[in-house]
Amino acid sequence: MTAPVCRYDYDLDALRGHVARIVATLPERCRMFYAMKANSAAPILRALAPLVAGFEAASGGEVAEARVVGAGVPVLFGGPVKTDREIADALRARVTRFHVESLLELHRIEAVAAAEGVTAEVLLRVNLAGPFPAATLAMAGRPTQFGIDESVLPDAVGIAQTLPHLRLAGFHLHSLSNNLSADAHLDLLRLYRDTVTAWEAEFGLRCEVLNVGGGIGVNYADLDAQFDWSRFAEGLVELVATFPGHWHEIDFECGRYLVAACGRYAVEVLDVKRNHGVDYVLVRGGTHHFRLPVSWQHSHPFTVVPVDAWPSGLPRPTTDGPVTVVGELCTPKDVLARDVDAGEIRAGDVLVFEYAGAYGWEISHHDFLSHPHPEQVFLGGQATSSASRMV
């Protein structure tokens, strides 16, 4: 008996082409790091390693995954909290620098670096006051757990400059996530330029590295209206020319924008039924594999692949109007799309969710109810690989 379709497909050739085009348009001094949290599958990392400047890791586990890909791959280590063990392991793994999120963390890194007999390079991640452009997620300009409050930055700079085993190289300013406007993102970088220039005058320091974070988004509501990278890159060339010459490195750390489009999540329709006036399409899979839609409270775009084969003697339920697509979990929150008119859908057809390459499998509660994991298929390159990719 054939198991129902349930798999992730990743197009590594499309991924390489997309990222190569992005990196090629970056002006001098700008470097693109890949934020591993979006998708840390080893084939994805191996495909990206020759193209990007390095990886941004947000945990000790991600640092270790990056080192499996290459001992010399530059790694930036961020994340809102870091244990002493993670800091020590990161120093032994020779990470390029740490993004520091609190005054206490400065002292933690100092203590571990002193014990290891090394100097740790750091950027101060600052939670700016804003205001910022509208985006799906705000990381700064409001109360969040991220970064050092701008009001205590003088203390942070003083500590970082005083501790003997730290070297302050600059600042990290990741303030929003999933911004869809190229012009708004350029305005954000202008704010960063003006803010850091003022800090240099206030604190009597010279910033060598400015990390502007990621935050470039994906439009899940309209796949044909994506972030205009060409417009952004053209404006970035002019904008970077106004940055002080001693800012020798302007780092981006994008994740979603780099890998989302390369992945698809395909699931078989197991049943179609109507309850209290709503048509439900029930699939093999759900939010335990692909949590992004329920996490962001959106209906994820999908296409229907008709499958004519059907067992004789079985009724084949069908719908041809607005549907809510749900998974196999015992919770009403297991919803992938709600009130979507996708035409005819029958039991046995396959739904393919596009732009599933980022924050899909990685953020999902894989083992809830102990359902089987989806197949993971990586297409392109020297060979096609298929694996369960247990985590």
Image: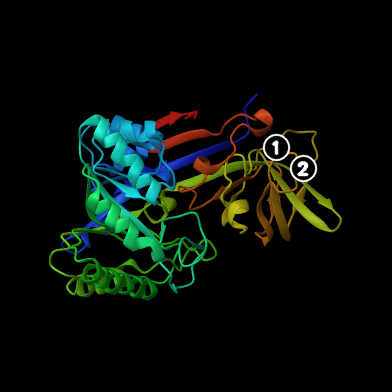
Q: Is residue 244 left or right of residue 224?
A: left
User: In the figure, is residue 24 to the left or right of 315?
Assistant: left
| Callout 2–callout 1 Cβ contact below 8 Å | yes
Name which quarter of the figure residue 90 lies in. top left
- The residue closer to the viewer here, 40 or 8, is 40
Task: Give me the C-alpha separation between circle 2 and circle 1.
Answer: 8 Å
* Disc 2, SS: loop
Q: Position of residue 218 (x, y in %)?
A: 45, 60
Could you tell which of marks 2 and 1 lies nearer the N-terminus? Answer: 1
Residue matched to label 2: 316
Which image quadrant is residue 61 in? top left
Instruction: Check the picture and name the quadrant holding the N terminus.
Output: top right
Name the residue furthest left.
245
> Residue, x 48% and y 53% (percent of image)?
355
Mark seen at residue 1:
none
Which residue does the image show at 40% across and 51% down from the upper left?
A: 102
Amino acid at dot 1: Trp
Residue 389 in the image: state x and y as whole percent. 47, 30
Q: Which residue, given by chain and number where applicable, does mark 1 sit on?
A: 310
Mark 1: give few (<14), some (14-19) or many (20+) Cα within 10 Å: few
Can residue 75 be seen at all in this image of the molecule? yes
Residue at 30% x, 71% y is 195
**x%, y% of residue 339?**
71, 61
Residue 383 visible from this viewpoint: no
